[in-house]
Image: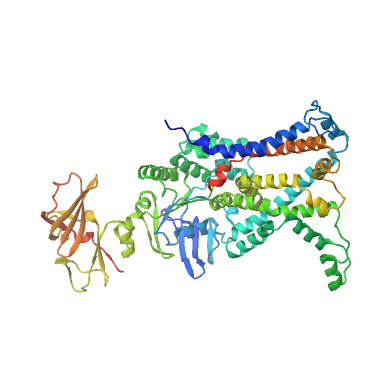
């Protein structure tokens, strides 16, 4: 008798996910219930770490991360919409070159790019301030080591993650629907609200999710560009695990971030039909 | 610009095209077309693909801007008016229904754009559903759940909902199967009569145009070759292109220019135009000696078309097609040599 090959073929992937995805999650979740500043997994479960998370000032880094992620997502969406529309409308050689220029930096290490950005923003001898001074005799200050610099860095790094799904979304809008809406009296704004936005929504939502989730976990922008102006949640978590040697606290913060992420991601994914996007 | 109405009065045309031209680079898609369309007329533009008919209707709807020329709607210049400000509506070839909206929302779209209150919109949408013979409960149905014919009706209802002065149709029936197309052709004609609106219809099928239209324009290479009633076009095609467009017709090339032309042993009356082609409709040929031009032909092929029977004939080098109504005379067998005839009055003479 022949056995069905499906489960056997799925087994390696399933085992891999079980060992390296489910297990770490379980361990982290379990650790978050251990007594503070212990390294044993055999302690009595307690919610002390979660209580501390909301009383010891950890809500601030969490809120900074969420605010940063939200702002970055919104600004990236606002910038990506016209970019995607233009790239789609003028598809061809020039558009391909621009697309490549936006995509290429993804292949360069994020830290390298951020240090480059920081050299650009450096006061006095930095690329921007130095050039302005040398050529036009204009002296400017610098936004380096501020929250604004961290935000600009995130927009710079995560823009492609918004743009490319949105480009796909914009390409889902058939030209004849736009013409029909115009023919029926739709102006620019109505066209956007009634036709373009709903039809491009799957791409927009995927882009927004990617950007938001990546930003929530982002650390390097705040560290390299933001200086000590802002502590984000991932920095706080890292500190708990390394410098503070308080694994249960780090684990509890991690679980909170996972829950926040899930609360955002889950409702969106339920509404987006990924198959429809992929089939196009 | 006024035209004389059948009643003898004068009226401003619903739509007046003056030297309308559209060029795309070196290509002239629409070449200085001039035309008046009367109020309430069902006007059809027929042409093969690439003739410029779709570009022309897009120019009329405001989806394209003409390179040159003027467009008047009831005497008012609308040449530069964008589509969303024109009091016209179009039924697209693809229908272009908003799949992310319900049937009701599709129909109400134009009213929503005008700022009509929701209850009034709903009332009008339900009215249109019944005008288009769709059940009222389709109001909340998803467009994607409708059949091909139903989608067609939704598209028409949506276009009518804006209460347009003129309705454009860009080959809306071309994707449907034959039976549904025939049904909708009749419904469209009825819709035209019931609404009394001016309909401008684009199709590549002269047959479809004949069924519905008050007047037909035949388009070729961006120009109108002939404009006339279906009767005119059918009986007096202006040139070989128009004649050939009507489907299966006999087009005889007449080389002589004498008192009477002879062709493949047939005596034909003197052509009315020089260098002419004689266009002879298949049903003008009859079996027997009924007509004054008589000849013997070999029957090569017999095709049963239902209401009529088609015979492919050979007279010397000449291939002819004859169609005889079902029930007229006896069926003739292929291989048989038979006497056929026709009336010279049935010939339409056309130049190249």
Relative to A162, say whether B238 is above or below.
Answer: below
Task: Identify the residue at horizontal 62%, vertical 45% (top origin).
Answer: A202
Residue A135 position by quadrant: bottom right
Residue B288 position by quadrant: bottom left
Quarter of the figure that contains the C terminus of chain B: bottom left
Query: How many numbered circles does the render carry?
Result: 0
Residue B81 placement (x, y as % from top left): 59, 58
Left of A271 or right of it: where is B11?
A: left
Does residue A100 appear in the picture of this structure? yes
Residue A53 or A211: which is nearer the viewer? Answer: A53
Left of B265 or right of it: where is A229?
A: right
Task: Identify the residue at horizontal 51%, vertical 66% (top origin).
Answer: B24
Q: Residue furthest top?
A: A44
Left of A75 or right of it: where is B173?
A: left
Residue A276 placement (x, y as % from top left): 55, 43
Relative to A6, say whether B350 is above or below.
Answer: below
Residue B22 or B228: which is nearer the viewer? Answer: B22
Residue A235 placement (x, y as % from top left): 81, 45
Residue B50 placement (x, y as % from top left): 43, 61
Does residue B113 appear in the picture of this structure? no
- Coloring basis for residues: rainbow
């Amino acid at each position: 008798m022949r056995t069905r090959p499906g489960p056997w073929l799925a087994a390696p992937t399933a085992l891999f996910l079980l060992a390296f995805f489910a297990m770490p999650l379980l361990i982290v979740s379990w650790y978050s219930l251990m007594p503070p500043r212990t390294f044993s997994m055999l302690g009595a479960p307690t919610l002390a770490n979660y209580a501390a998370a909301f009383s010891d000032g950890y809500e601030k880094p969490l809120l900074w991360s969420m605010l940063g992620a939200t702002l970055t997502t919104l600004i990236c969406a606002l910038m990506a919409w016209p970019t995607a529309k233009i790239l789609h409308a003028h598809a061809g050689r020039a558009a391909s070159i621009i697309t490549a220029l936006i995509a290429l930096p993804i292949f360069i290490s994020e830290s390298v790019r951020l240090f480059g950005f920081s050299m650009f923003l450096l006061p006095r001898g930095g690329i921007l301030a130095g050039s302005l001074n040398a050529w036009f005799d204009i002296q400017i200050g610098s936004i380096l080591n501020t929250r604004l610099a961290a935000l600009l860095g995130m927009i710079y790094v995560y823009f492609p993650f918004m743009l490319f799904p949105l480009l796909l979304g914009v390409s889902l809008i058939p030209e004849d629907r736009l013409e029909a809406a115009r023919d029926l009296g739709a102006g620019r704004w109505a066209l956007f609200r009634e036709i373009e936005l709903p039809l491009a929504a799957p791409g927009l939502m995927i882009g927004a999710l990617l950007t938001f989730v990546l930003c929530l976990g982002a650390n390097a922008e705040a560290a390299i560009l933001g200086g000590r102006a802002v502590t984000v949640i991932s920095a706080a978590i890292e500190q708990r695990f390394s410098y503070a040697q308080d694994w249960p606290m780090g684990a509890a913060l991690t679980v909170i971030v996972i829950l926040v992420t899930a609360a955002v991601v889950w409702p969106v994914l339920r509404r987006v039909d990924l198959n429809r996007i992929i089939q196009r | 610009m006024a035209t004389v109405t059948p009643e003898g009065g004068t009226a401003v045309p619903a739509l007046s095209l003056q030297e309308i031209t559209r060029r795309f680079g070196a290509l002239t898609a629409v070449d200085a077309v001039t035309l008046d369309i009367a109020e309430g007329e069902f006007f059809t533009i027929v042409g093969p693909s690439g003739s410029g008919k779709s570009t022309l209707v897009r120019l009329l709807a405001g989806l394209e801007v003409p390179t040159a020329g003027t467009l008047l709607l009831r005497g008012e210049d609308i040449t530069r008016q964008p589509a969303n400000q024109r009091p016209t509506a179009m039924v697209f070839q693809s229908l272009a229904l908003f799949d992310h909206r319900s049937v009701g929302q599709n129909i109400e779209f134009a009213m929503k754009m005008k700022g009509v209150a929701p209850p009034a919109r709903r009332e009008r949408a339900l009215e249109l559903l019944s005008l288009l013979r769709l059940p009222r409960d389709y109001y909340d149905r998803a467009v994607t759940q409708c059949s091909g014919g139903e989608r067609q009706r939704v598209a028409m209802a949506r276009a009518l909902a804006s209460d347009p002065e003129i309705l454009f149709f860009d080959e809306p029936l071309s994707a449907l199967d034959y039976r549904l197309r025939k049904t909708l052709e009749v419904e469209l004609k009825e819709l035209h009569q019931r609404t009394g609106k001016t309909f401008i219809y684009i199709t590549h099928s002269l047959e479809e145009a004949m069924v519905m239209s008050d007047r037909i324009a035949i388009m070729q290479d961006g120009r109108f070759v002939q404009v006339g009633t279906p009767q005119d076009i059918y009986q007096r095609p202006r040139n070989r292109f128009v004649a050939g467009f009507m489907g299966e017709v006999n087009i005889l090339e007449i080389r002589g220019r004498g008192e009477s032309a002879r062709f493949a042993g047939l005596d034909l009356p003197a052509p009315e135009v020089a260098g002419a082609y004689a266009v002879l409709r298949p049903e003008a040929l009859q079996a027997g000696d009924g007509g004054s031009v008589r000849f013997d032909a070999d029957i090569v092929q017999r095709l049963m078309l239902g209401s009529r029977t088609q015979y492919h004939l050979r007279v010397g080098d000449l291939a002819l097609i004859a169609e005889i109504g079902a029930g007229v005379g006896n069926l003739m067998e292929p291989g048989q040599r038979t006497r056929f005839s026709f009336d010279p009055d049935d010939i339409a003479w056309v130049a190249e």
